[in-house]
Amino acid sequence: MCVVAQIEQQLKEEIKNAVLKAGLAEEKELPDVILETPKEKVHGDYSTNMAMQLARIAKKAPRQIAEEIIAQFEKEKVHVEKIEVAGPGFINFFMDNHYLTDLIPDILKQGGTYGKTDYGKGEKIQVEFVSANPTGDLHLGHARGAAVGDALSNILSAAGYDVTREYYINDAGSQIRNLALSIEARYFEALGMEKELPEDGYRGQDIIEIGKELAEKYGDKYVHMPEEERLKFFRDYGLKKEMEKIEKDLADYGVKFDVWFSESSLYESKIDEAIKVLDEKGQIYEKDGALWLKTEQYGDDKDRVLRKSDGSYTYFMPDIAYHRDKFARGFDKVINIWGADHHGYIARMKAAMEAIGIDPERLEVIILQMVQLYKGGKKVKMSKRTGKAVTMRELVEEVGLDATRYFFIMRSPDTHLDFDLDLAVSESNENPVYYAQYAHARICSILRQSEELGISFHADNLNLDLIREEKEYDLLKMLGAFPQVIIDAAEKRAPHRVTNYIQELASTFHSFYNAVKVLNEENPEQTKARLALVKAVQITLKNALSLIGVQAPERM
RNA sequence: GUCCCAGUAGCUCAGUUGGAUAGAGCAACAGCCUCCUAAGCUGUAGGUCGGGAGUUCAAAUCUCUCCUGGGACGCCA
């Protein structure tokens, strides 16, 4: 536990003691101590609303209660310099912030692990994201999903959860037959023959190329083959090609999955098992030649079809078997990251979990709202190059990996995202990515120069008494907050809290940089202490950026 | 029609478990480099938190209702 968490803990404890000593409440009726960090410095470093909360229990005016608490409070024990009662009854604590300097050697020693905690206690969480159909290129929505899913996974890991990243490959069902038919049409086309592309076939450039490739490799070998045999080959071939491409796109995007789960593997036995369980629980029935699941009684709009009257399964059925399998694999929580167009599906899936005997609370769905590209103040609908929707690869080529990922993480998942291309590519002060990276590069520059000057410092041999400036304390407060930021971001499934933190930390550093000179040959002891401080900032900044998959450059 | 998300400064958005005078970046205006990277800093100005009602010591935050924008509602996946 870092000093900040320790002090906060002790402050809460001391507030509690003071309340009990003042006889304002019994131990069992005592509300949880809420400690806040006020927005304004005039309200101190910490503040509590305890007096207001106790107004009813103690039957006294809040300000009166506050005074009584203060009278019993032992300041010296917890680095409190001054206490004030303010407003309707807030108790504001002004700290002797020098204790914060203990963070410096602490962070230097922890290095790349600073910020990590065991908060999640190794709870097993699966995050399933992207899971795009293997029928074309990854697009903007997938890019957002990949960025958010990867960042959230990193954040959960850092907060002490045992995280598995998973991609669900939709390699069964009608869209895959469609893929085979689309490839078939392009294959014939490449051979100069006519074959109609199905109406809802895939028209992507990638399919055209697969068709060409097949024609070059095999000539007209497949023209004379029985249709089913040909389609099976094209299906398997296309699937392999598409998945290789998706996997490469994601790897280039900095995202790696632990498990690639195949939908078609469910057809071996897991679907039958799931149906059997549902049947035993009396959750299914036959009507109009189809098999239905009673989801309505669990909050869904209506019951849903599992097996169509033609004997094939709907998408829903293997998905139920899939989710049942996830929990059977021992995950305490399962998080799905879906596009906004799937939100109607949540109630259905949760109902299915309940029907099959799994607590639906253990399934969480994060819905990502739509992404809209802007350029020159106008909506970008299509790629200029291809005339089709803009792909993830094109986006990264245009604005770079760091900016792409940063922009996607920057906003809360449930807001519609306007992605400003001009802003993302601009190498200027308008661009929030560079603002943060620049802070890191500046620190690296200072550290390089200290080496050239032959100044070295060691975590165990610092004179921390020479850290006394207001701006230095501001920085230390930011550094100390980092572990809790990760916990909050993990708990609220809100990666954008990390980018908010990065902006704030960078801003606090830039402000410090302009006010305080680090390298000062006339005062080597202070220089060493300050070098250690900026080194701690560098470590924290780099750790934060790595959570969201953004580089921390040493020069810019 | 039912459901989900959003509505906060000119623009893009934060806003902790309900807390004090609602914050940041950009844009605007005024300053700061003989000094560790000016992709930076300091300051000024800018708001009926979509409207209304309620809950309470206290509401951007909770409840109800209405308005606006986006999306979802298949024996598709």
Image (spheres, rainbow, N blue to C red):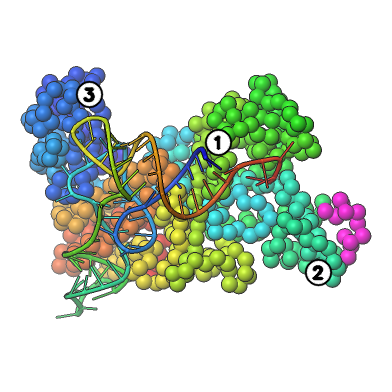
Is A174 displayed left or right of B51 in the figure?
right
Q: Residue at x 33, y 57 (%)?
A: A503
* CA gap, disc 1 and disc 2: 45 Å
Which residue in the protein does label 1 denote? A347
Q: Specify start and end residues of the magenta stretch as a single range.
A: A220-231
Question: Which numbered disc, 1 or 2, marks the residue closer to the eye?
Answer: 1
- When the figure is inspected, residue A19 is found, relative to residue A449, above or below; the finding is above
Is the residue marked by circle 2 packed among few (<14), some (14-19), or many (20+) residues within 10 Å? many
Q: Is residue A124 left or right of residue A543?
A: right
Amino acid type assigned to the residue bearing label 3 in the image: Leu
Please name the residue shown 16% across and 27% down the image: A55
**Residue A66 inside the magenta-drawn segment:** no
| Residue in front for this viewpoint, A9 or A309 | A309
Residue A221 inside the magenta-drawn segment: yes
Disc 3 crowd rating (10 Å Cα; few below 14, some 14-19, many 20+) is: some
Q: Chain of mark 3?
A: A
Of the residues under marks 1 and 3, which one precedes in the sequence?
A: 3
Q: Secondary structure at mark 2?
A: helix
Q: CA distance from mark 1 to mark 3?
A: 39 Å
Q: Evaluate whether residue A40 shows in this view.
A: yes
Q: Quadrant of residue A271?
A: top right
Which corner quadrant of the image does residue A330 belong to? Answer: top right
- The residue identified by callout 2 is A190
Which residue, given by chain and number where applicable, does mark 3 sit on? A30
Label 1 Cα neighbours within 10 Å, binned few <14 / some 14-19 / many ≥20:
some
List x then y, in percent, for residue A445: 32, 68
Q: Quadrant of the N terminus of chain A?
A: top left
Quarter where residue A194 is shown? bottom right
Nearer-N-terminus badge (1/2)? 2
Disc 2 or 3, which lies upstream in sequence? 3
**Residue A477, percent from left and from top:** 24, 49
From the viewer's side, name the closer residue of A299 and A269.
A299
